[in-house]
Image: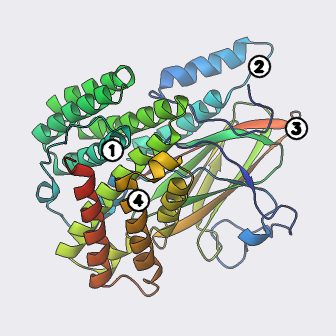
Amino acid sequence: MNHLVFSSVFAGLLIGTLNLAAAPQGTKGVEEFDPLAFPGKVVGDVVVPVPSEVFSVLDKLGEPNWRAELRKADLPPSSDRTKLSLLFGYTVAEGFVAVQAEDKEAVKDLGRDIIDLAKSLGLSKSVLPHAQSILDAADKSNWSAIRKEFDQTQKTVRDTMEQMKDIDLSHCVSLGGWLRGTSSVTSVVKKSFSADRAELLNQPMLVEHFVSSIEKMPVSTRDHDVVKSIRKGLAVVLQQMEGAVDGFSKDAVQEISKTCDGLLTEILAKK
Amino acid sequence: MKAPFEGRKMMNHATSSLVKVACAALALSVASVVYATVDEAHDFTMEAAMPFVEQGFIVREDYWNGEVKSGQKLMITHQLFKGNEYAFWLGTSQEGVTLDMKVFDEKNQPVQIKATSDKFFMSVRVNPPKTGTYRIVFDLKSKKDEGVLWALSYGYR
């Protein structure tokens, strides 16, 4: 997630004081915090959770059939760097699904896809060591090591993109990953609906972050057909999240699912 | 080189190993003049994370960092998922710094359940009562330096 350009923003500077009365930690109702009166700085960077953070909760709430969530998608050939970046994020997220499914062959296939995408993006040098580690760890069925490598791979790619001043592409990597991860979550929730599972979709801050990221992209990226679709789709997703004041309904989950799947279809389209 | 207190781009830490922590510690002990870096601050967060990793926490590769004026409060918003347990590790590579960190939910209530601190880092645990946006508020007070380099990492299980 190294669209983590440190963009500290003064928030409510000197508006008031932070009311943090001395109190034992964890004593609810004693300490009060007013973010609107925060006298310090707000760190603007957003760390987007990896899919496995959500998957781990779903595992605790039941035993999803992760193998059924795997998609054997053929990556479309492309020289479009925006699309390649979205595909990169998608592929890494798919890797997290494969780890959850403990599917060695799927992990290896995805590791090879990552190498191909890195070559197309001109990032082979920084990605190859991670991809090789993924393949090696897959041979040993070392799932925790693979999970760590997928996380590192994504971070390395975003860091490298940002070093090359391609911050918009770095955001696209995050977007592709979040869309794929969210699609998996909605799929699992739909198959075994419960309020606890559906609550995992309460991520408006992340959606707002993505919307804001798109708005800051250069016009050429912002006007990209797929990015325009994503912008529209995020508005739909955000509406569902903001409307879930008393929890997510099955219909809301279905709407988020349909939106994410539709966007992924566009990302994976051969055009 | 960025100006003091200006944010710094996060460094790529492909490996946050014991070796690096050891090297950082060695460098600190040998050098008479300490040139602390945000990388070293991150190394200390990884040192703080080690006992948590032994308890099954998965450490995220992404983290926040920068340089801040001593005593200046910072706030980070972050997505947490109910059902996971989280740990946040705040680190600095400078000596004589007092660290403080609290985590608040959407209703601005504190949710941290346990905090521990050491010379160069502190840790806070959170069991989020709901899935949503949380605020991590922290500051670092130095007895001798105007600016403090910091890093904040997290893990989950």
Do the residues indicated by labels 3 and 1 lie within the same chain of the protein? no
- Of circles 3 and 1, the one toward us is 1
- Of circles 3 and 4, the one toward us is 4
Q: CA distance from mark 3 to mark 4?
A: 51 Å
Which residue is at 77% across, 19% downward?
A: B34
Do the residues indicated by labels 4 and 1 lie within the same chain of the protein? yes
Q: Is residue B115 above or below residue A76?
A: below
Q: Pick the residue in front: B128 or B107.
A: B107
Residue B34 — which label? 2
Position of residue B143 measured from the top left corner of the image (x, y, whole percent):
88, 38
Q: Which residue is mark 4?
A: A228
Callout 4, which amino acid? Lys
Q: CA distance from mark 2 to mark 4?
A: 49 Å
Residue A230 — which label? none
Do the residues indicated by labels 2 and 4 lie within the same chain of the protein? no
Q: Is residue A167 above or below residue A71?
A: above
